Image (cartoon, rainbow, N blue to C red):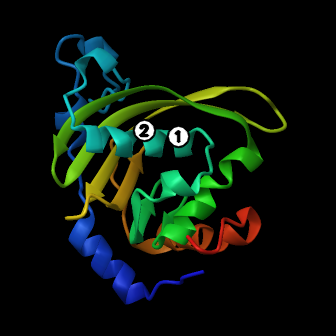
Amino acid sequence: MPSQDPAHAESLQDKYEIRPDPIASTHNDEDPSQNASSGVDYEPYPEKSVHISPEHEKIVKAITSLYSGSASKEDMEVYAHDAVYDDPWSYCDTRYKIAGQWYGIPKIMAESKTLATEVVSDSPTEIIYKQKQMYKPRPLYLSKEVNSLVTLTLDGEGKVRYHKDMWNEKDYSHEGLGKVMKTLNGDHLTKITRPPGDL
């Protein structure tokens, strides 16, 4: 079960983190009423999705399967061993820690389902897409839909090195108490969710 040297994690962040411009990527010019007050529209419109290669389609399918509770080693293999996951609640700096997040989905959610995606940008080293995810947590069984902007940074072998999930227009700071709490969550959730040790 690999751990990560903080200095090495920071070097991964420096090398692979993309800070997308959410307004430029998602602002709805055709129907401005759909934009949030911040100017972003994270509602996915699948018919507007840009064309991506079969290899990138496979990556997006694996990631959305993980969001939907697959807890699959095969899906986890889209990540490099040294990779970062960054969302409002967690900061993980190895594939094993990332698995700790995904293997928790079936434990805390009665259902999690990707309802729609829209790829807004694609290149050999990045995939940026909008996603609508439905979550139904236990034991309330009340569903909630969350729209977000997902950014995947890829290395030369096509592995995900940085996975960022933004729920609003604000990018993440890597300083202060919020970062400390996110890192603690990433470091320790594996003790509860117990993903396979060979990840």
Disc assigned to residue 61: 2
Q: Residues within 10 Å of mark 2 (few under 14, many from 20)?
A: few
Q: Is residue 32 left or right of residue 2?
A: left
Q: Residue at x 36, y 24 (%)?
A: 44
Q: Mark 2 and mark 1 in contact? Answer it, CB < 8 Å.
A: yes
Residue 184 image point, x, y percent: 60, 73
Return the residue at label 1: 65
Q: Residues within 10 Å of mark 1 (few under 14, many from 20)?
A: some
Residue 85, compared with residue 10, is above or below; it is: above
The answer to whether residue 58 of the structure is visible from this angle is yes
Q: Residue at x 33, y 53 (%)?
A: 171
Quarter of the figure with residue 128: top left
The answer to whether residue 88 of the structure is visible from this angle is no
The kind of residue tagged 2 is Lys
Q: Is residue 99 left or right of residue 167?
A: right
The kind of residue tagged 1 is Ser
Residue 142 image point, x, y percent: 74, 26
Residue 84 image point, x, y percent: 41, 66
Residue 5, compared with residue 172, is above or below; it is: below
Residue 75 image point, x, y percent: 50, 51
